Each structure stands twice: as structure tokens, then as C-alpha cells.
Image (spheres, grey):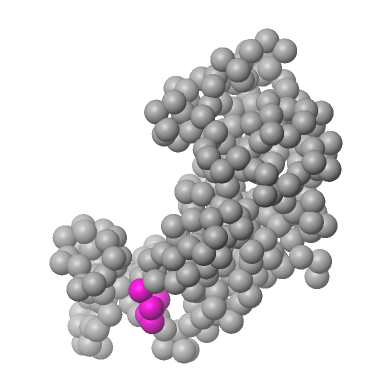
């Protein structure tokens, strides 16, 4: 299988300029290295009717192309269940009955990093589990053997982050994102993961999970986000931040694409044209502070 890169949006709404920029970078990384480029719709939760079609149309409008069919996570439950089963048969899965609130209020385990699951249900006896099952369906958690893991990122170098007893399947039986993303990337032959650097913190968990499942680690590149002037994530109030809203102001998709390329120090003329000059080492390292006046300027 030719190795691949990918873009994996959650169909929870319209893509904004930040998402489009990340998608363009994922495409540039993949295509400039002769990889296939795949699209995967991460619709295990947060799916909104019509959002997938709108996202695909926007991605095509900024010049992205992709190989093969779009994969939807909601259609792959048996694959995730098989991965959970293999962890379970290795003794690495336990049932957890904690509510969000109980987790927040539990005293954290000694030396456990902040935000890590405190391990409340790790040592329940069979009788205790049976009793709790009568009141609440169980989520499934990983019995992690480490508290941190180090992975390598093309832009951030070696990065060490927290690993805890992460959820593998929620108590509504929906597979957890961390599990699905690891299983899918390996199954699709994805060996290059380019995504926003807001996801860097959860990557050590995913890399650890991949090693437990005997899956190869992809190369990671966590790219800078687009932020507003307060250095917060882009939102509607920051101006026209979607292709539809920009089109209403007379800025077409080709112009948006070129303005995003300019933010990456790449030449205008469309995504394909930018490929020749693309050099990951020359990428701006900092977030792009969104300037609506520049993006919305008359063509
Ligand atoms: N679906 C995730 C998101 O839209 C991205 C996951 C990934 O790229 O690994 O934030």
C-alpha cells in the first residue's frame, strides 16, 4: 500500500479558515512526498446533518483532491470493537462506572499528572463491578502501564505527554476518539499525520496505544493554528471565517486559498501551484493571527 497522509474533520459544522489551512498543509505534506491523500469523516459524535457534504465541497473548492472513497468512522464500529477485544484479551481493559463529576472530585493518585483519570475503577472486585453495573452502563478504559510517553514530531521535536487510563469505549458504547484515530490511521496505511497543534497534547496517548496494538507509529506534524487577536481560537465573531461567509463579502474560494497560502509564505496561484515551493522546514512556527481586514479585502 502506498503510504498516505490524511485530513480527518469532525462534521460538527462548517470548516473555518483555520481548518482549511490545516487541510491545505496536510495535503501539501502528503502530495509533496508522493503520498496518497485520504479524507476521513470523524462522525462518531458531533455529526450535524449536511455538515459532511458542505465540508467536502469546501475542501474541493480550495483545490484539495483525495484518493479513494471518503471513510466514515460511524461505519467502522466492528473494527474498533476488534481492537478493544485484542486489548481485553491481553488484560489491558477494565470497566469504569465513574461519572464526569466523580472523576473531577476524586483525589488524584500520587504523582499522577493533572487531569489524569484517578484510577477509581481500576481495582474493583468482580462483586463491586456487578453491583455497579446494575446502576450504570460501564465505559471501558485502558489499563495503562506508563504515565507518560514520548513521541517525535516533525515541528516540535521529541514531545513527552501524559498517558492515563484513557477511555476506549464510552458508556453509550461509542468508541473513543483516541482509539478510533489510531486504528483507522493504521488500517488506512496513514504514515503521516498532519493536524492542528491543539492535538499535540493527546498524541502521546495515541502513540502509546498504537504500540500496545502492535501498530506502526506515523510521522507526526502538529501545525500552528489560526488565532484571533486575543490569541484565541477563531470563531464567528472574528469576521467572515468560512468560505460561505467570505463569498457573501465577494471573496471567492481561489482568493481565500491564495490568502491562506500567503500566510504560509507560499506563492499565490492555487494549492497545486504551491506544491513545488513547499518546504516543511520553512513553515512559520507560530500561530497565524487572523486579520479580517486582509482576508475580507476586495479582490
Ligand atoms: N477529527 C479531529 C478534529 O476535527 C481531528 C483528528 C485528527 O486529525 O487526528 O479535530
- 33 left or right of 138 in image: right
Outermost front residue = 282
| Image location of residue 176, percent across then percent down | 46, 63
**Looking at the rendering, in which quadrant would you find the C terminus?**
top right
In this view of the protein, which residue sits in the foreground, 15 or 160? 160
| Image location of residue 230, percent across then percent down | 39, 28
Relative to residue 256, is residue 38 depicted above or below?
below
Residue at the image position 47 percent from the left and 89 percent from the top: 89
| Image location of residue 148, percent across then percent down | 39, 71
Observer able to see residue 72: no
Outermost top residue = 298
| Image location of residue 293, percent across then percent down | 56, 15
Residue at the image position 60 percent from the left and 40 percent from the top: 284
Residue at the image position 49 percent from the left and 74 percent from the top: 208
Q: In this picture, which residue range is highlighted in magenta?
A: 140-147
* 78 magenta-colored: no
**Looking at the rendering, in which quadrant would you find the N terminus?**
bottom right
* 142 magenta-colored: yes
Amino acid at each position: 500500500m502506498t503510504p498516505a497522509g490524511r485530513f480527518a474533520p469532525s462534521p460538527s459544522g462548517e470548516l473555518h479558515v483555520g481548518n482549511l489551512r490545516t487541510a491545505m498543509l496536510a495535503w501539501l505534506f502528503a502530495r509533496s512526498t508522493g503520498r496518497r491523500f485520504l479524507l476521513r469523516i470523524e462522525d462518531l459524535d458531533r455529526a450535524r446533518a449536511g455538515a459532511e457534504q458542505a465540508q467536502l465541497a469546501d475542501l474541493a473548492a480550495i483545490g484539495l483532491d483525495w484518493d479513494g472513497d471518503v471513510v466514515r468512522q460511524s461505519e467502522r464500529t466492528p473494527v474498533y470493537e476488534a481492537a478493544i477485544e485484542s486489548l481485553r484479551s491481553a488484560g489491558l481493559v477494565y470497566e469504569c462506572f465513574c461519572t464526569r463529576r466523580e472523576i473531577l472530585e476524586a483525589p488524584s493518585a500520587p504523582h499522577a499528572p493533572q487531569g489524569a483519570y484517578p484510577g477509581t475503577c481500576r481495582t474493583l472486585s468482580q462483586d463491586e463491578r456487578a453491583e455497579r453495573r446494575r446502576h450504570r452502563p460501564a465505559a471501558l478504559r485502558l489499563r495503562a502501564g506508563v504515565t507518560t510517553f514520548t513521541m517525535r514530531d516533525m515541528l516540535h521535536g521529541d514531545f513527552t505527554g501524559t498517558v492515563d487510563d484513557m477511555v476506549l469505549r464510552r458508556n453509550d458504547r461509542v468508541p473513543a476518539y483516541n482509539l478510533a484515530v489510531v486504528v483507522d490511521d493504521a488500517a488506512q496505511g496513514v504514515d503521516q499525520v498532519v493536524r492542528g497543534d491543539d492535538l499535540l497534547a493527546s498524541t502521546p496517548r495515541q502513540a502509546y496505544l498504537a504500540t500496545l496494538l502492535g501498530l506502526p507509529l506515523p510521522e507526526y506534524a502538529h501545525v500552528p493554528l489560526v488565532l484571533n487577536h486575543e490569541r484565541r481560537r477563531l470563531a464567528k465573531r472574528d469576521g467572515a471565517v468560512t468560505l460561505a461567509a467570505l463569498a457573501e463579502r465577494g471573496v471567492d474560494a481561489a482568493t481565500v486559498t491564495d490568502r491562506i497560502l500567503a500566510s504560509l509564505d507560499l506563492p499565490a496561484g492555487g494549492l497545486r501551484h504551491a506544491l513545488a515551493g513547499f518546504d516543511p522546514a520553512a513553515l512559520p512556527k507560530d500561530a497565524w493571527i487572523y486579520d479580517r481586514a486582509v482576508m475580507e479585502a476586495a479582490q
